[in-house]
Amino acid sequence: MTNCDGARRHVGLDRSWWWLRCSSGELDTRILLWRKAIHVLAAVEAWPLVVLPTHVVAWICIVVCLGTFVTQRRVPYASLAVVTLLPFVPSIAIGGAWVVFAVGDGFASPIGRAWGRRRFPGSRTKTWLGTIAFATTSMIALAIYLLVVGRSATDAIEVGALVSAAAAVTEAMVIWVDDDYAVTVVAGIALAVCLR
């Protein structure tokens, strides 16, 4: 990664998202960090998933999916995962899954790209350090979320560790579907099972 200092910059399409790239093809660090900071802040969107009625959440997610596809020509897979989970998983688990996705994915990419050297087995792009960052940050965020929604401290830490580990391994290993979709679905199902 680089800051493109003194280099010519151009905008290009990379993995369904607009990135600022240097003339050398390197991703501008500032843009990546800004995008991932917004990603982490999106964890706040978990609260409407918990407090709004299911049909309202479904309509919001469908409108977001359609609007994003029409305007940006990409699918917001995490929102699609929420729509998938709505009929089967309680809203507290869906909110927690959103927190795991937003925070874990928001930290994994910058940390893995900056300092990760060893690749995760079976992955060409995911690193051990990025996976550890995903698991650690999402566990902390999920534990805080579970404490806020009324779970005990012991329960929040245990469930947070288990669900975050499952989601981190899913994010690193999944190759057959978008990782944002898979992480959100796995975290939601794991939370639903753990919170019974």
Image: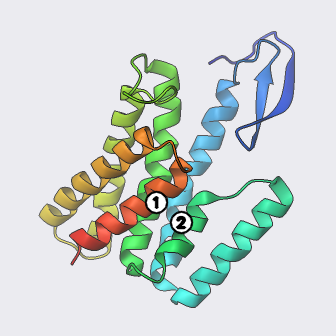
* Location of residue 1 in the rendering, given as x and y in whole percent from the top left corner: 62, 18
Does 103 appear above or below 127? Answer: below
N-terminal of the two: label 1 or label 2? 2
Residue under the image location 29 percent in, 56 percent down: 163
Say if 19 sits above or below 186 in the image: above
Numbered mark located on residue 81 in the image: 2
Badge 1 density bin: few <14, some 14–19, many ≥20, Cα 10 Å: many
Residue at 48%, 79% in the rendered image? 86
Residue 56 visible, this orientation: yes
Disc 2 marks a residue whose amino acid type is Ala
Q: Residue at x 37, y 76 (%)?
A: 92
Q: Pointers 1 and 2 in contact (CB under 8 A)?
A: yes
* 147 sits to left or right of 138: left
What is the C-alpha distance between the residues marked 1 and 2? 6 Å
Q: Residue 184 got which mark? A: 1
Using the rendered view, name the quadrant where residue 19 is placed.
Answer: top right
Q: Could you tell me residue 139's position as x and y percent?
A: 30, 51
Comparing 20 with 182, the one in front is 182
Tell me: 61 left or right of 162. right
Q: Taking the image as drawn, is residue 137 in sight?
A: no
For label 1, the SS is helix
> Is residue 161 shown above or below 152?
above
